[in-house]
Amino acid sequence: DYPSRPWVGVGVVVWLDDSVLLIQRGSTPRKGQWSIPGGMQQLGETLRDAGIREVREETGVTIAIDGLVDVVDAIIPDGDRIRTHYTLVDFYGHWISGEPVAGDDAAAVKWAPYNTLTDYGLWSETMRIIDASRKLRS
């Protein structure tokens, strides 16, 4: 909380046919909520490499990144101060191999058919990113 600079995070919408790989977050922010896999970029790591690594660490799945969806600034103010500021770079990609198994900071992981995503209480920005990635895949 109350950082001196924004933190760079990466997320990946991973597709297998018409299903999306979801993780249930095991830690803050948004602990217990369903989301796309992702995490923080490490020093010396490209964003694409960070996305591939984070998906593998959280789900055990190997993916390929197909393209950039969008960049989202998650800024939470606290009066005159900024409590948190994440710059989230969201990619989309596709499954290459592996069975999903919760790892790292994921409490659970699953393939969710696109037409069931409203059942998971996804953050509106996450759903917007998933929808945008679906259009980019076409």
Image (cartoon, rainbow, N blue to C red):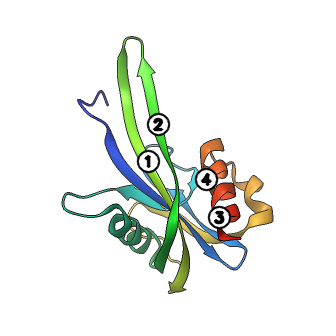
Mark number for residue 30? none
Three-letter amino acid code at disc 2? Ala
* Cα distance between the residues tagged 4 and 3: 10 Å
* Cα distance between the residues tagged 1 and 4: 11 Å
Q: Nearer the viewer, residue 32 or 136?
A: 136
* Cα distance between the residues tagged 1 and 2: 7 Å
Mark 1 in CB contact with mark 2 (< 8 angstroms) = yes
Three-letter amino acid code at disc 3? Leu
Q: Which residue is mark 3?
A: 136
Q: Nearer the viewer, mark 3 or mark 1?
A: 3
In the current view of this chain or complex, which residue is farthest to the left? 44
Q: Residue at the location (48% across, 71% down)?
A: 102
Q: Residue at the location (30% across, 56% down)?
A: 41
Mark 4 in CB contact with mark 3 (< 8 angstroms) = no
Q: Residue at the location (63% across, 61% down)?
A: 133
N-terminal of the pair, mark 3 or mark 1, is 1
Can you see residue 17? yes
Residue 11: % across, % down: 47, 58
Sort mark 3 into few (<14), some (14-19) or many (20+) by Cα contacts within 10 Å. Answer: few
Mark number for residue 88? 1
Residue 48: % across, % down: 38, 66
Q: For the residue labelled by badge 2, is the local secondary structure a helix, a strand or a loop?
A: strand
Can you see residue 99? no
Q: In the rendered image of this protein, does residue 133 appear above or below residue 27?
A: below
Mark number for residue 74? 2
Mark number for residue 129? 4
Q: Is residue 15 left or right of residue 62?
A: right
N-terminal of the pair, mark 2 or mark 3, is 2
Q: For the residue labelled by badge 1, is the local secondary structure a helix, a strand or a loop?
A: strand
Q: Quadrant of residue 34?
A: bottom right
In the current view of this chain or complex, which residue is farthest to the right? 115
